[in-house]
Image: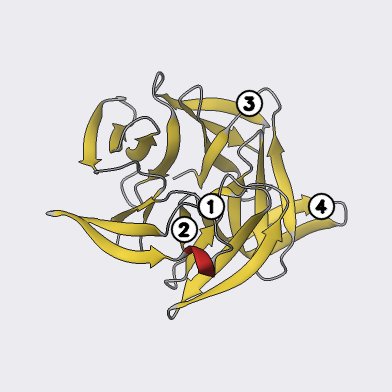
Amino acid sequence: MISPSRIWFAVREVGKVLQYDSSSGRVTPVFDAYPKWIGAFTPHPSIGEKVFYTDTSKAQIILHLLPSHNEAVAFEHSTYIRCIRFGNDQKLYFSEAWGAGENGRIYKVEENGAVPYLEVPLDSIHSYWAGNFEFAPDGTLFISSGNHRPSWIFSYKGGRFTKLAKLPIPVMGMDYVEGARIRTADGERTVAKGLLFADFESSIYLFDIDTGETYLIFRDDSLKRITDVAVAP
């Protein structure tokens, strides 16, 4: 990965968000929330000091402030929150999901509580969803199976789900990127539209939405359960 060169990722069991800098190859800490297990996180789109994350043992969204590392509960739900993302309206969205048990849902956080945004029917996405989703700037919503083998990636726009890929690895914590530059065996390549994602193990990949190709961009076998990724703000 040449650009963006700095990627944040969450390692669930150690409760940390780390930064990988591809220009130096170094991995450094962003913040440590242990003993909490971080299931998902998302930086605020315009306020770099704010990072929101979920604790897999509680139905909460937690605000973490950088560099002070002060924290506060930003939102509490009635059941476990699986994924959190900011929409193009700079509102915070979250999902609730039960794997293959029942349809999942995405909500938008408003001042007076959670407002239903979308029901995700299992029969439209190969009967399994762990709650992973992401927005593109044009309003397209991306859905992935999550911690499942194989895993599917879908786009949702105009009320319709479209299958983009079936991958043999889990697709966790998608982050939409445009104009990413990578090095391959054939030289440098630009991915016009892509999704960064983690494999729920030790690796981070880039999925090319236009071509369907997948590129390994980071792997560290000493790290286990990478759950989410984001381009560093």
Residue at the spot of label 3: 223
Q: Which of 25 and 107 is in front in this view?
A: 107
Q: What amino acid type is highlighted by mark number 3?
A: Leu
Q: What is the secondary structure assignment of the residue under circle 4?
A: strand
- First in residue order: circle 3 vs circle 4: 4
Q: Name the residue under label 2.
A: 134
Q: Distance between the residues labelled 4 and 2?
A: 26 Å
Identified by mark 1, the residue type is: Met
**Residue at the farthest bottom position:** 158
In the image, residue 50 above or below residue 32: below
- In terms of secondary structure, where does tag 3 sit? loop
Label 1 and label 3: CA atoms lie apart by 19 Å
Residue holding disc 4: 184
Up-down relation of residue 135 to residue 230 (above or below): below
Q: Which of marks 2 and 3 is nearer the N terminus?
A: 2
Q: Which of marks 1 and 4 is nearer the N terminus?
A: 1
